[in-house]
């Protein structure tokens, strides 16, 4: 088998509507060697998000292998999302049942160790798989090129509690392990995602392509869910914006920050706490995306999906 010259990546997902769009972007860009798509419970149960992942990869005719992972958080009770509906991907014609092989953590370790310093992991679900891999192989963080994470919030309110973003709130203990680990971390927080929705008019630009009808069906349901549960118009592109950083980092502005995860607070459990003080010693452990050019994102999204 001919070795790919494309940069290797792993996509770690709890496949809901925005995850689906992120996976489409990364696959259709043809810029990456997708070594594995690993699934984790989050937006919905592990079996549903794994089935959803199979549906999206089949739709894309992608050969990327799927490895199911953790079916519950490290310590807390399971939390599920509301906006994605009962299936976790309402509007999608999911028919196949993908077997749960439980190999995600093993595969993450295997791929990273086979490609030291080269693998980027796109973490667009709770961090349970990644934290479990780090617990099993403490030297692994130093062998990863970077983690691109959809998670946390700097100044925006939470979308699962008063202060916590959904992916972090699902498994704060896992997020704490990952955020404190010695690996380069690019964070896409709610602050950016909340200001850059896409609308049905944007998706209409895909008309005439194979993906137009399934995307429109999924996005209609997603937009209804966002409107009902988050009182916001449009499809919030949480995960696609994280994926976009890999595709076009020049369109993204970032800032180094000291961000920690709260795991003990009664009201602040799952909060991503940033030290915004202008004084005192900081440990700048994450690089946070602070702005993305929306015109560039929408244009590139449409052009890539139309390929």
Image: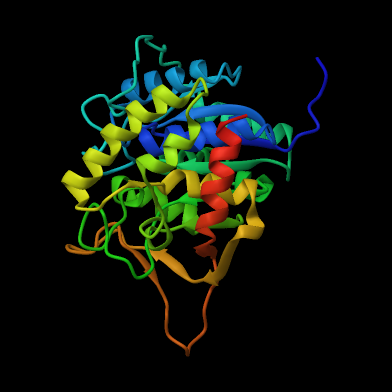
Query: How many marks can you see?
Result: 0
Residue 150: percent from left, percent from top = 45, 50
Q: Report whether residue 77 is seen.
A: no
- The colour scheme of the drawn protein is rainbow
The outermost residue toward the bottom is 279
* Quadrant of the drawing holding the C terminus: top right
Residue beneath the point at 63% across and 50% down: 146
Front residue of this view, candidates 59 and 6: 59
Answer with left or right where residue 163 lies relative to residue 238: left
Whether residue 176 is situated above or below residue 274 in the rendered picture: above
Residue beneath the point at 17% across and 62% down: 266
Residue beneath the point at 58% across and 66% down: 253
Front residue of this view, candidates 17 and 205: 205
Q: Residue 285: which quarter of the image?
A: bottom right
Q: Report whether residue 70 is seen.
A: yes
Answer with left or right where residue 198 lies relative to residue 165: right
* Quadrant of the drawing holding the N terminus: top right
Whether residue 238 is situated above or below residue 101 in the rendered picture: below
The outermost residue toward the top is 96
Residue 193: percent from left, percent from top = 40, 55
Residue beneath the point at 27% across and 59% down: 158
Q: Residue 270: which quarter of the image?
A: bottom left
Residue 229: percent from left, percent from top = 18, 46
Residue 192: percent from left, percent from top = 43, 60
Q: Residue 42: which quarter of the image?
A: top left
Front residue of this view, candidates 212 and 262: 212
Answer with left or right where residue 86 lies relative to residue 184: left
Whether residue 88 is situated above or below residue 137 in the rendered picture: above
């Amino acid at each position: 088998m001919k070795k790919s010259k494309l940069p290797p990546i792993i996509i770690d997902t709890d496949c809901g509507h925005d995850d689906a769009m992120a996976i489409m972007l990364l696959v259709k860009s043809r810029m990456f060697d997708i070594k594995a798509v690993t699934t984790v419970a989050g937006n919905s149960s592990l079996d549903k998000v794994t089935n959803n992942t199979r549906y999206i990869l089949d739709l894309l005719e992608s050969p990327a292998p799927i490895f199911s992972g953790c079916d519950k958080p490290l310590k807390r009770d399971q939390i599920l999302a509301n906006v994605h509906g009962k299936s976790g991907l309402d509007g999608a014609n999911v028919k196949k049942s993908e077997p749960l092989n439980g190999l995600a953590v093993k595969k993450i370790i295997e791929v990273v160790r086979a490609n030291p310093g080269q693998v980027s992991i796109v973490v667009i679900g709770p961090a349970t798989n990644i934290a479990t891999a780090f617990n099993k192989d403490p030297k692994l963080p130093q062998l990863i090129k970077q983690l691109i994470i959809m998670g946390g919030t700097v100044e925006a309110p939470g979308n699962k509690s008063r202060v916590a973003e959904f992916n972090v709130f699902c498994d704060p203990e896992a997020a704490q392990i990952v955020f404190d680990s010695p690996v380069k971390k690019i964070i896409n927080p709610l602050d950016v995602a909340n200001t850059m929705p896409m609308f049905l008019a944007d998706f209409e630009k895909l008309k005439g392509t194979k993906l137009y009808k399934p995307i429109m069906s999924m996005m209609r349901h997603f937009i209804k869910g966002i409107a009902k549960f988050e009182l916001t118009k449009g499809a919030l592109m949480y995960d696609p914006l994280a994926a976009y950083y890999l595709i076009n980092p020049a369109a993204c502005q970032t800032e180094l920050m000291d961000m920690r995860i709260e795991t003990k607070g009664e009201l602040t459990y799952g909060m991503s706490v940033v030290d915004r003080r202008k004084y005192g010693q900081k440990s700048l452990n994450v690089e946070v995306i602070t702005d993305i050019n929306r015109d560039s994102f929408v244009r590139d999204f449409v052009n890539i999906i139309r390929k």
